[in-house]
Amino acid sequence: MKDYIFTSESITEGHPDKICDKIADAILDAALTQDTNAKMAVEATIKDDFILVYGEANTTADIDYAKIAKDTVKAIGYEEEYTVLVKVNKQSCEINQAVVHQDGEIGAGDQGLMFGYACNDSDEYMPAPIYYAHKLARKLTEVRRNNSMLKPDGKTQVSVEYKDGKVARIDTIVVSTQHDKDATQEEIKELIMKEVIKPCVEENLVDENTKYLINPSGSFVVGGSFGDSGTTGRKIVVDTYGGMGRIGGGCFSSKDPTKVDRSAAYYARYVAKSVVANKLADRCEVQVAYAIGKSAPVSLMVDTFGTGLMSDEELLKVIEKNFNFEVSNILNELDLRKPIYSKTACYGHFGDPQFSWEKVKKIS
């Protein structure tokens, strides 16, 4: 289809799934701060005032898991007292030996397939629906932190109309926000439209037919872990491309960079974005796959959906000449052993120029 409406959603840091992503990545950063070779896969689950922190860790770092979990929830804006149960074991020695080779080479921490995607919808080379959904979610959090009427939990959704494959207009904007029990829906709608939606969306993309649905369910007083349960890694579409562009088989948050679910997905995005930014295609998707313990990928594929300046087969050769998908190179080229991951846990892992995988490489 060349004429269609495509929808993507985002969520705020107060959503229970994102609370868990933020706890997981805060734990990872705490480990990497003390031990750059930490092997971590520690996740979280939350319901009401109970948090379960669990997983595997192989690190010399001294980590207070319960304190990190409580501090993360408090920083988000929840004031309740939480009970934290910790169940973290050491990583399997068999997995560790497969990943860290005697010659210093790093093998993939697991088998799996990863995708990277980029398009020229936006300056960030992200699809317009997820770009605007994240923009609204960030703004909602900013406004919430300065207005006691709003509370931490929230979701956004944007439906973009495409004509001949190009962004034409925004058809529908949905914003749902947790709020104080004394706030009226009229007050909320006025605030969200004035301080969240209008500053985020260019006037030329909306018209008299654009629909605005603000708290369409009505009252949203009970939120966060008291309104729903949450678990690390449940929002992988929100974390990637909003459904436009395929995704791999694993989530990102909690995983150290030897886990290719995370690092290779970042590298694939780096490659796809570089292809589009170098004007070799309007859209580009890269798939890479690994076997556990092996540094080089078992397969590599590129698809430009008919928008490339050359055939996909020719472009694949160019990619193989300019990029190195071996795990050790990914860690080094993108400088992934630093405690940078808490910043990725909300509003998507792609599109933010502060991250190394968002830089553009000149392709020869």
Image (tube, rainbow, N blue to C red):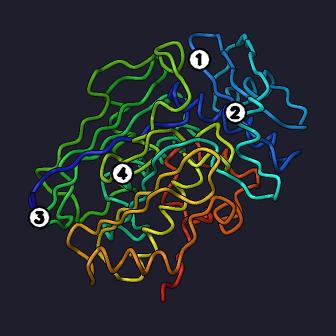
Q: Which of 3 and 217 lies nearest the eye of the viewer?
A: 3
Task: Residue at 55%, 47% (x, y): give it.
Answer: 291
Residue 177 is labelled as none
Of the residues under marks 3 and 2, which one precedes in the sequence?
Answer: 2
Element class at badge 4: helix
Task: Residue at 10%, 67% (x, y): give it.
Answer: 164
Q: Residue furthest bottom?
A: 364
Q: Amino acid at mark 2?
A: Ala
Separation of residues labelled 1 and 4 (CA atoms): 26 Å
Which residue lies under the disc numbered 2? 75
Which residue lies under the disc numbered 4? 130
Based on the displayed image, in which of its 4 quarters is residue 307 positioned? bottom left
Q: Give x and y (percent) for residue 205.
A: 23, 62
Looking at the rendered image, the disc whose residue lies closer to the viewer, 2 or 1, is: 1
Can residue 56 be seen at all in this image of the molecule? Answer: yes
Judge from the rendering whether residue 139 lies leftward or rightward of residue 332; answer left or right.
Answer: left
Looking at the rendered image, the disc whose residue lies closer to the viewer, 2 or 4, is: 4
Of the residues under marks 3 and 1, which one precedes in the sequence?
Answer: 1
Q: Amino acid at mark 4?
A: Ile
Above or below residue 249? Residue 101 is below
Element class at badge 3: strand
Which residue lies under the disc numbered 1? 46
